[in-house]
């Protein structure tokens, strides 16, 4: 057993990012299908560690204690970058995309329950392999699995939820690029004013040079830390109530309030460049750490019936993105980038969605609309909508 402390894990995550960048740069298929660099590097390292465990009984244990703070810092930067005045301009698009997302939640749970029932499994297993873990992620999966165990007596619910969420995280980062590449062939790419990069969204150009000062950096870091502290406090207050929300949603909410409240009062105007730098650093390190520390052998705990459900869900996500998300959102370049983002958080998580879109826009051109809509829907509205949809499905008289 090789145990890495916090510093060693951080070094490893940094090397994974550099490794992923190199792999994508020298591997034409990865570039062609716009596979995100953290996904390429992190997944390859996870596979190497799996082989080392199987062949040489060598295990590497990472200290992932900073993984959650990095994720929360990413969501705080999303909130700090959310200018409500700009969001109003995309209000109609946000509303339409939210309905598209609601449709996927219904599809995922319908497929999960139907296939689980047909295979002779408890229908609750179908819900766990549906929107709970795929659109909800590890946090939502862990929360609902404990409910299923305590209320319905479902055994091994937590293990199944973690395995399903892990499966989704990997596939969400892998199918977004190919789906978008297929769709981009059908649309006109950004040119002229549409390709203007002078005022990008915070996460739209992660490789762009950002001119910031030490003072702006420290001020923005302070805002992120306040967002984390405030979000965790609010999440604690709501814990156990019908308004209970994941901590990252509360952190994002505090970031939005800080950004717009301070600006409205004229006390402080958030420096978007610094938010962009800190947000992208948090995003990249979080994804690298999450993927390199994947325990792929845990996926073997998924019995063949569960793998069948998840395989169908993956195909359904790709088809839904191509034939529903893309078409409803306008059949244009922005719609193609939105489809890639939808694959990311429809199977994995919002950070995966952002990474998918960055990989696409880095190659084909910017999409201001996508980077305006996806973070708000994927990070905030989806959790509320998912909770409602899950509870509606639990009303069905099919659970023992």
Image: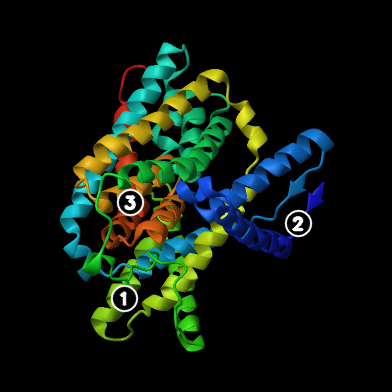
Q: Which residue is mark 1?
A: 198
Other-residue count near label 2 (Cα within 10 Å), few / some / many at <14 / 14–19 / ≥20:
some
User: Which residue is found at the position 21% from the left and 47% from the top?
Assistant: 329
The foreground one among 354 and 65 is 354
Please provide percent x and percent y for residue 399: 39, 19
Q: Secondary structure at mark 2?
A: loop
Which numbered mark, 3 or 2, is in the foreground of this view?
3
The answer, for residue 242, to whether it is visible in the render is no
Q: Secondary structure at mark 3?
A: helix
Query: Considering only order in the chain, which callout, 1 or 3, is on the residue closer to the N terminus?
Result: 1
User: Which residue is found at the position 48% from the left and 66% from the top?
Assistant: 280
Q: Is residue 58 above or below residue 397?
A: below
The foreground one among 179 and 11 is 179
Which numbered mark, 1 or 2, is in the foreground of this view?
1
Q: Mark 3 to mark 1: distance in Å?
A: 19 Å
Please provide percent x and percent y for residue 42: 61, 50
User: Which residue is found at the position 43% from the left and 24% from the top?
Assistant: 126
Q: Which residue is mark 2?
A: 4
Residue 349 lies left or right of residue 322; in this view the side is right
Other-residue count near label 3 (Cα within 10 Å), few / some / many at <14 / 14–19 / ≥20:
many
Q: Secondary structure at mark 1?
A: loop
The foreground one among 44 and 347 is 44
Q: Which residue is mark 3?
A: 337
Which corner quadrant of the image does residue 357 belong to?
Answer: bottom left
The answer, for residue 251, to whether it is visible in the render is yes
Query: Considering only order in the chain, which callout, 2 or 3, is on the residue closer to the N terminus?
Result: 2
- Tag 3 near tag 2, CB within 8 Å: no
Q: Which mark is residue 295?
A: none
Residue 210 lies left or right of residue 193; in this view the side is right
- Tag 3 near tag 1, CB within 8 Å: no
């Amino acid at each position: 057993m090789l145990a890495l402390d916090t510093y060693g894990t951080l070094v490893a995550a940094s090397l994974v990012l550099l490794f992923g960048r190199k792999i994508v740069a020298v591997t034409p298929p990865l570039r062609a299908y716009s596979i995100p660099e953290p996904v390429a590097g992190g997944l390859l390292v996870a596979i190497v560690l799996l082989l080392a465990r199987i062949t040489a009984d060598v295990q590497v244990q990472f200290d992932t204690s900073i993984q959650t703070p990095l994720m929360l810092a990413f969501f705080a930067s999303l909130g700090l970058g959310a200018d409500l005045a700009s969001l109003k301009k995309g209000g109609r698009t946000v509303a339409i995309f939210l309905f598209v997302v609601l449709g996927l939640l219904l599809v995922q749970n319908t497929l999960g329950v139907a296939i689980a029932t047909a295979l002779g499994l408890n229908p609750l297993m179908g819900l766990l392999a549906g929107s709970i873990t795929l659109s909800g992620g590890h946090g939502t999966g862990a929360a609902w699995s404990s409910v299923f165990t305590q209320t319905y007596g479902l055994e091994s619910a937590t293990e199944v939820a973690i395995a399903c969420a892990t499966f989704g995280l990997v596939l969400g980062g892998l199918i977004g690029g190919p789906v978008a590449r297929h769709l981009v062939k059908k649309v006109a790419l950004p040119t002229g004013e549409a390709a203007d990069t002078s005022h990008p969204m915070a996460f739209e150009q992660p490789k762009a040079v950002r001119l910031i000062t030490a003072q702006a950096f420290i001020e923005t870091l302070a805002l992120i830390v306040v967002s984390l502290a405030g979000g965790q406090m609010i999440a604690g207050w709501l814990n156990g109530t019908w308004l209970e929300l994941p901590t990252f949603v509360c952190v994002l909410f505090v970031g939005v309030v800080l950004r717009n409240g301070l600006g409205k009062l004229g006390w402080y105007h958030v420096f978007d460049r610094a938010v962009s730098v800190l947000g992208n650093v948090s995003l990249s390190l979080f994804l690298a750490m999450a993927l390199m520390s994947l325990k792929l052998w845990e996926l073997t705990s998924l019995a063949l019936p569960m793998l069948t459900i998840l395989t169908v869900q993956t195909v359904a996500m790709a088809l839904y993105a191509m034939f529903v998300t893309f078409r409803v959102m306008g059949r244009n370049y922005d719609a193609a980038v939105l489809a890639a983002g939808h694959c990311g958080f429809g199977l994995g998580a919002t950070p995966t969605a952002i990474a998918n879109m960055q990989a696409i826009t880095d190659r084909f051109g910017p999409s201001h609309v996508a980077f305006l809509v996806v973070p708000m829907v994927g990070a905030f509205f989806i959790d509320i909508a998912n909770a409602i949809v899950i509870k509606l499905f639990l009303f069905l008289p099919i659970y023992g």
